[in-house]
Image (cartoon, rainbow, N blue to C red):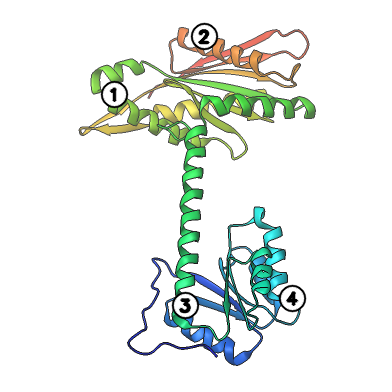
Amino acid sequence: MIDAPGAQAEAPLAPALPREILVAEDDAIYRHLLQTLLRRASFLVRTVSNGVDALRIAQADGAPRLLIFDWMMPGLSGIELCRRLRQERATRLYQYIILLTSKDAKTDTVAGLEAGADDYLTKPVDYQELLARLRAGTRILELEDRLLNAQKEMEYLATHDSLTGLWNRLVWKKLLAAEFERAYRNATSVAVLMIDLDHFKSVNDTYGHSAGDALLNKVGDVLQSLVRAYDHVGRYGGEEFIILAQELSRDAVYDYAERIRSTLAQTAIMHEESPISVTVSIGVAFAEILQERSPDVMVRAADRALYRAKARGRNCVYLDAISNTANAELCECQPAHIA
């Protein structure tokens, strides 16, 4: 049996967030006692009576990360469970495993730890010792969570623009290369949209850089909301943004760009109780079928189209449709109609 605590000795573990524990124990009385004592310590407890059910639950999505396994169980033993779960370590978050057993030989302890158990308790288990081991396991899991969150944050900062949260230019080069390779193989259309905020310098000069940053952030949000789920949008640099769109017709690409332009023309932010709005010029390079894998030609064509849109008076879309045979330009520019 478990050496239960006296009234004076009891001290709930009280983790910051309730941790779920999976208890696998074939003895019904012992299993019920473990469940009762762990619930008293503010844990969420799931129990099973055999190793097969324990493995199924431990492998499921959202599985408990604190595991207590009896050594001897029908189906799979606790030590076999440890081996199976550790073999799959790379595919799931770390799970902290405590083995319970009546064995107390040193060779048994070593065998359990070598199989992947994090800790080992001999029956009858002392309640306070079990809670102390669970505190250690909880700290280890919380440490791993903090490390994983820090890693994700570092990965995010390395791949996203810090102001707008869009893909940064370094990632864009890789995305363009991969998507152009796919479009080249599948013979599908590709469009690159270069978007530049008109007269953005005057916003910074008039309202300050904090207002300019807020406007850029707002533009990023709007672009993210307008692109299709399988398109890509990023910040190209300064006040320039870039969009990669695939599998659209020439007319659909122009309509797509025009919808972006008109939506942004109606977008504003509040600065000291005054609305600040901005228009954009959009240069579009479109190819129905790519003649080469590299995106460089299309990016340069989109950049040239952007300059032509600005030369036409800004706040418009300029489309450069690259012919499949002769690389001839079919250019279309339609100035915006401002209400």
Which label is found at residue 308? Answer: 2
Q: Earlier in the sequence, mark 1 or mark 4?
A: 4
Report if the CB atoms under discs 2 and 1 are less than 8 Å apart: no
Q: Quadrant of residue 229?
A: top right
User: Is residue 54 positioned above or below 34 on the image?
Assistant: above
* Mark number displayed over residue 324: none
Q: Earlier in the sequence, mark 2 or mark 3?
A: 3
Determine contact: label 3, label 4, CB under 8 Å.
Answer: no
Q: Residues within 10 Å of mark 1 (few under 14, many from 20)?
A: few
Left or right? Give the position of 74 relative to 120: right
| Residue that mark 4 sits on | 76
Q: Is residue 337 visible?
A: no
At 47% from the left edge and 25% from the top edge, which residue is drawn? 261
Q: Nearer the viewer, residue 54 or 140?
A: 140
Q: Amino acid at mark 3?
A: Glu
State the separation of the CA atoms marked 1 and 3.
Answer: 59 Å
Percent across and percent down for residue 85 are 68, 63
Residue at the disc numbered 1? 209
Mark 1 or mark 3: name the one nearer the start of the chain: 3
Distance from disc 2 to disc 1, alpha carbons, whole Å, reads: 27 Å
Which one is closest to the eye, mark 2 or mark 1?
A: 1
Q: Residue at x 42, y 30 (%)?
A: 219
Give the residue number, with chain letter if any, for mark 3. 129
